[in-house]
Image (cartoon, grey):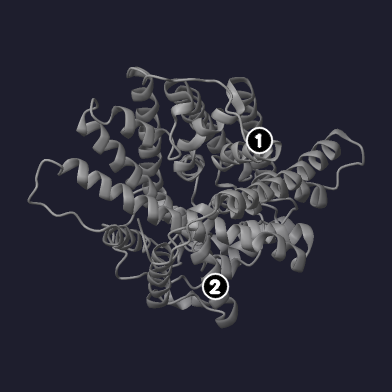
Amino acid sequence: MESELVVEEMKNISTTISSTSSPHDSNNIIPKTPKSPFSSKILMSPLASASPIMKKALTYMEEIGHLTKLHDPAQDAWLPITESRSGNAYYAAFHTLCSGIGVQALLLPLAFITLGWIWGIISLSLVFMWQLYTLWLLIQLHEFAPGMRNSRYLGLSMAAFGEKLGKILALFPTMYLSGGTCVTLIMIGGSTMKIFFQTVCASDSHITTLSTIEWYIVFTVSAIVLAQLPNLNSIAGISLVGSISAVTYCTLTWVISVVKERPEGVSFEHVENTSDVATICAIFNALGMIVFAFRGHNLVLEIQGTMPSSLKNPSHVPMWKGVKFSYSIIALCLFPLAIGGYWAYGNLMPNGGILSALDKYHGEDTSKVILGTTSLLVAIHCLTSFQIYAMPVFDNWECKYTTKKKKPCPWWLRTGLRVFFGCLTFFISVALPFLPSLAGLIGGIALTVTLAYPCLMWIMIKKPNRYSPSWFINWSLGLLGLVLSVLLVFGAIWTIATQGMDVHFFKTQ
C-alpha cells in the first residue's frame, strides 16, 4: 500500500513538472528573476541554460534522498550564483581557468631574482601543491553534511567559525578579492587597450590616442554591457574566451623571451641587500609574488554551486574533474613563465615583470603584430575575468534585497546594481591610482582565504581525530598560512616605510 502511494505521488509530481508553464499551478513555482530586456538572446552565452525549479518536486525528492537540500530553495533560485544549476565539469574548468590565471603570473620571474633557481622552483612547487590541496578541501566542504550546500565562501566560513567570527574573518578578504580585483582589472585592462592602440596605430601620426582615463571608460563600459548576463552559468562562454586568451598570452610571452637572444649582462647572482631585515623582507615579498599568482579560491564554492547535485551524483565529482584539468593547464603556463622568464632576463628583469621585459629588450626586433596581439589578449582576459570576479558582489547585493523583500530583484534593479558597481570600480581606479602599491599589504590579509582558512574550516567542520594525519596536516598548514600572512603584511609595511610610496589622488599615469 505504501509503495502504491509513493508511485502515485511520483506521478503527481511528474504531472506538476510537465505543466510548469501553466498559470494555474503558480503556487508550486518559485518566482524567477525577471529577465532584463538588455540581456537578449544575442548577448546570452551559447553555453548557458537554466530551468525553473519546483518547490513540490524539491521537497519530495529531498524526502526520498534524490536531491541535496538547498539552503533556501526560493532565495537560491533568485540569486545570480545559484539561479541556474545546470553547470558541469566543462563550465567549472572554464571558470576556474579564467579566474585562476592573472597578470600577477607575469611577475613570477621577479621572485626568482631573490630566491634563486633552487628555492624559486621549490617554493613555486610547494605553493602550487598547497593551494591545490586547499581547493580540494573547499570542494569537499561544499556539501559537508547531508541536506546542506554552501555555495558561497562567506557562508561556509560562518558555518565553520560561527556567524559573527566567520563574517569578520571572511567578509573583507572575499569582498576585496572580488571588488579590489575588478578595480585592478580596470587599470590593467584600460592600460593594455591603450598600448594595443598605440602599437597598431604607431605609424599613423594623424590619429590621436585617448587618455588613460578615457581608456578606463572604454573598458568599464564594455564590462558593464557584458555584466548584464544574468547568472554565473550564463558567462561560461565568456570564461572560455578568457581562458583561451590567458593561456595564449602567457605562452606567447615566455616563448618569445626564450627564443629571442638574451640581452647582454644577464646574471643569476644573488642580489645583496643593505641589511638583514631588508633581505628577509625581500624574501617575504618574493614568496608573496608566488602566492598571489594563484587566485580564485574565493570563487570555487560559487562555481560548484552552479552544478546539480544528488546523493548518487554529488557535485564535488564533476567540480574536481574540472579543477584538475584547469590547474594542469595553469601549471603548464606558470612554471615555464617563471623559469623561462628568469632564464631569459635574469637580474635584468624590470619591476613590471616579463611583459615589460619583452617590450624593453625585444620591442624593436619583435613583430608589431605579436606585440599588439599580446596586449589585446591581456585586455580580453581582464574583461572576461571582471565578469566572474564581480558575480559574488552582485550576488551579495541581491541577497540583501531578496532577504528583505522576499521576492526576486526586478530586472531594472539588477541592471542598475551592475551599472552602479561598474561606475564605482571605475571611480576607485581613477581616484586611487596608487592602489596596486598596496596590493602586498592587502593581499597579505587576503592570503588567508587561499592557504589558511580552508584547512581550519576542515578541522572545525569535519572534526578529525586528534593527532590523526588529517588533524596534524590541516592544523600545521592552517597555522603556517596565518603566520605567512602576518609576515607578508609586515614585509609590505616595511617596504612602504623604507622605500616610500607615491600617493597621488586622481592622477593616473
Q: Which residue is mark 1?
A: 279
Q: Is residue 200 left or right of residue 3?
A: left
Give the residue furthest to the left. 206
Residue under the image location 37 percent in, 45 percent down: 381
Q: Is residue 230 above or below residue 200?
A: below
Q: Specify the amino acid type for callout 1.
A: Thr
Give the residue furthest to the right. 466
Pick the quarter of the image with the C terminus: bottom left
Pick the quarter of the image with the N terminus: bottom right
Q: Specify the amino acid type for callout 2.
A: Asn
Instruction: Say which of 145 and 333 sits in front.
Output: 333
Q: Is residue 299 left or right of residue 372?
A: right
Q: Quadrant of residue 374?
A: top left
Q: CA distance from mark 2 to mark 1?
A: 65 Å
Query: Of helix, strand and loop, which one carries label 1?
Result: helix
Whether residue 39 is visible, yes or no, is: yes
How many residues crowd mark 2 within 10 Å: few (<14), some (14–19), many (20+)?
some
Instruction: Say which of 471 and 268 sits in front.
Output: 268
Query: Of helix, strand and loop, which one carries label 2?
Result: helix
Q: Position of residue 141 (x, y in %)?
A: 70, 48
Residue under the image location 25 percent in, 31 percent down: 370
Q: Position of residue 462 (x, y in %)?
A: 81, 47
Q: Position of residue 103 (x, y in %)?
A: 44, 42
Instruction: Say which of 206 and 281 sits in front.
Output: 281
Whether residue 9 is visible, yes or no, is: no
Q: Position of residue 477 (x, y in %)?
A: 76, 39
Q: Which residue is mark 2?
A: 28
